[in-house]
Image (cartoon, rainbow, N blue to C red):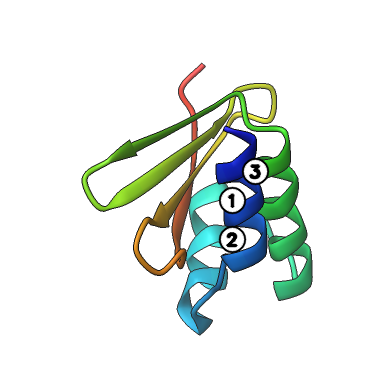
Amino acid sequence: MNKLINTLINQICYTALVYGRINKKLNISLSNIEIEDLVRKTILTATNIERIGKNYYIYNHPANIRITVNANNFRVITADKLDK
């Protein structure tokens, strides 16, 4: 899992639209740099990472966040709150 985490951290990328989507879905108001920092921290402290189809789902249960990343190009797709 450590090799996958390193790959995700080094190759992750973002589209212009994903910043707004993350703010909306997590009900937050962060700058682009703050969102990138949040995603990086979520990946580094992930409690579980699973690949289903073409996506990685990165779970961070203490932070109550799931990040979805495309497994082919490592582009962030969205972030969701986990159900408690």
Q: Could you give the CA–CA distance between mark 3 and mark 1, rounded to whole angstroms?
A: 20 Å
Neighbourhood count class around disc 2 (C-alpha, 10 Å): few under 14, some 14–19, many 20 upward: some
Q: Could you give the CA–CA distance between mark 2 and mark 1, rounded to whole angstroms?
A: 6 Å
Q: Which residue is mark 2?
A: 23
Q: Position of residue 38 (x, y in %)?
A: 72, 52
Neighbourhood count class around disc 3 (C-alpha, 10 Å): few under 14, some 14–19, many 20 upward: many
Q: In terms of depth relative to the viewer, which is nearer, 54 or 34?
A: 54
Q: Position of residue 9 (x, y in %)?
A: 66, 57
Q: Is residue 80 above or below residue 15?
A: above
Say what amino acid the circle numbered 2 marks: Asn
Q: Residue at x 72, y 40 (%)?
A: 44
Task: Residue lying at the far top in this picture: please name it.
Answer: 84
Q: Earlier in the sequence, mark 2 or mark 3?
A: 2
Say what amino acid the circle numbered 1 marks: Asn
> What secondary structure is found at the residue carrying circle 2?
helix
Q: Position of residue 35 (x, y in %)?
A: 69, 62
Q: Nearer the viewer, mark 2 or mark 3?
A: 3
Residue 27 has which mark? Answer: 1
Neighbourhood count class around disc 1 (C-alpha, 10 Å): few under 14, some 14–19, many 20 upward: few
Q: Which residue is mark 3?
A: 43
Q: In terms of depth relative to the viewer, which is nearer, 38 or 72?
A: 72
> What secondary structure is found at the residue carrying circle 1?
loop
Q: Is residue 70 above or below residue 79?
A: below
Q: Nearer the viewer, mark 3 or mark 1?
A: 3
Tell me where residue 47 sits by quadrant: top right
Kindly indicate whether the residue at mark 1 contacts the one at mark 2 (C-beta within 8 angstroms). yes
Viewport quadrant of the N terminus: top right
Q: Residue at x 25, y 53 (%)?
A: 54
Q: Position of residue 70 (x, y in %)?
A: 37, 59
